[in-house]
Image (cartoon, grey):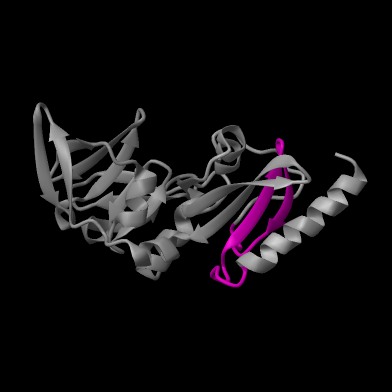
Amino acid sequence: MNNEYNLSAKEISQQYITMLTDWLPSNSSIAIAVQDTYIYFHSGHQSIHLEVGQQVQSGSIAEKVLNTKRRTDAILDNSLFDTPYYGIGYPIYLQGVPAALVVVLPSTFTIQKVDPYQFLTGKQDEDWNPVAIEKISHIESLQKKTWFYVEGEQFKTSITLKELQMRLPSSFIRIHRSYIVNIHFIKKMSRDLTSNFIVTLKDGSELPVSQSYTNNLRSALEF
């Protein structure tokens, strides 16, 4: 893309931003991608990792919008963000060229509009078992499947960890890309030989805490 195109695209992009900021929460982020590159980015999140000129990632909302020319929404994991966010992508045109406008809303905005889960239904052998959410000690993503644990028993659910994090009560904390834990089942927190935190549950299970989620745990448990 030449400089003249870039200048015009920025001017048009700014018009979209001006309109969107009238109704978006102040901590929302907005990105515009043309072809395979982000040409505009406004961040409302301190934890967002995206820059003008960055390539559109495979599987992202922007890529899906550019490929399908349709509105797309999804819960975003921490590939670009430290914590999950809700994103909506819209197909637009800049000087006749297909583009994607992506609005990223903070997870708290989505949670306020969706009731938290009261129970999860898990599969064990050939049976499906509804389980009250407060009985679940932790949830794990393993081999592209999601499992939750109740008194040592393992149940499988079709709901992903990303989706669960947006709909679980505040007593559930994401501590790792693969784990969500119910703080009511935590016995203690300690450090391993590499100074990373380990969460020990009341049943003796030990779960790692990744560095990107350490602040989540510290904030929730105030230590």
Q: Name above or below for residue 211 compared with residue 146.
A: below
Residue that protrudes farthest toward the front in the picture: 96
Q: Is residue 155 left or right of residue 53?
A: left
Q: Name above or below for residue 174 compared with residue 66.
A: below
Q: Which residues are magenta?
A: 21-47
Magenta-colored stretch includes residue 138: no
Picture quadrant where residue 28 is located: bottom right
Expressed as whole percent of the image width and height from the top left, the position of residue 51 reads 72, 50
Q: Is residue 217 left or right of residue 80?
A: left
Q: Is residue 76 visible?
A: no
Picture quadrant where residue 93 is located: top right
- Label tally: 0
Expressed as whole percent of the image width and height from the top left, the position of residue 202 reads 19, 53
Picture quadrant where residue 29 is located: bottom right
Q: Name above or below for residue 30 compared with residue 18.
A: above
Q: Residue at x 70, y 36 (%)?
A: 36
Q: Is residue 114 left or right of residue 134?
A: right
Q: Residue at x 68, y 50 (%)?
A: 32
Q: Is residue 78 left or right of residue 204?
A: right
Magenta-colored stretch includes residue 39: yes
Which image quarter holds the N terminus? top right
Residue nearest the viewer, comparing 134 with 214 = 134
Expressed as whole percent of the image width and height from the top left, the position of residue 15 reads 73, 63
Residue nearest the viewer, comparing 157 with 142 = 157
Which image quarter holds the C terminus? bottom left
Q: Residue at x 25, y 38 (%)?
A: 147
Q: Is residue 155 visible?
A: yes
Q: Residue at x 29, y 56 (%)?
A: 168
